[in-house]
């Protein structure tokens, strides 16, 4: 009886450790993707500011929108700026 409980306990602990490791790696994957998107988004906004709209103000909020939304977020930021709302 004691032997069965310890095997079940070890199985539960190993399962929890594997689940936590998988969750950490999943979160790390999305954190890295978000960081890359924010850098690309900053340079895309900077290129638009340099070549198209010099009055475009690059703020942290616009970079966050572009980082989370990707190309769609970039289009939303440009559309809002074009409408005078951004």
Image: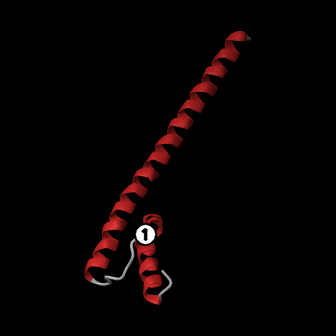
Residue 4, located in which quarter of the rendered image?
top right
Toward the viewer: 10 or 50?
A: 50
Residue 54, located in which quarter of the rendered image?
bottom left
Residue 13, located in which quarter of the rendered image?
top right
Position above or below: 17 against 24: above
Residue under label 1, please give it. Answer: 59
Toward the viewer: 58 or 14?
A: 58
Q: Residue at x 47, y 83 (%)?
A: 80
Q: Residue at x 44, y 65 (%)?
A: 60
Toward the viewer: 71 or 81?
A: 81
Q: Residue at x 25, y 81 (%)?
A: 51
Toward the viewer: 81 or 34?
A: 81
Position above or below: 49 against 34: below
Left or right of 50 on screen, residue 67: right
Q: Which corner quadrant holds the N terminus?
A: top right
Q: Residue at x 40, y 72 (%)?
A: 71
- Determine the secondary structure under disc 1: loop
Position above or below: 6 against 28: above
Left or right of 55 on screen, residue 86: right
Q: Which residue ends up furthest to the bottom in the rendered image?
A: 83
The percent position of residue 52, horizontal first and vertical second, equals 29, 84
């Amino acid at each position: 009886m004691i032997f069965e409980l310890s095997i079940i306990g070890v199985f539960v602990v190993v399962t929890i450790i594997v689940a936590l490791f998988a969750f950490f790696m999943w979160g790390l994957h999305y954190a890295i993707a978000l960081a890359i998107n924010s850098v690309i988004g900053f340079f895309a906004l900077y290129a638009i500011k340099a070549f198209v709209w010099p009055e475009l103000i690059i703020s942290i909020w616009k970079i966050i929108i572009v980082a989370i939304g990707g190309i769609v977020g970039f289009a939303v930021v440009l559309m809002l700026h074009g409408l005078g709302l951004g």
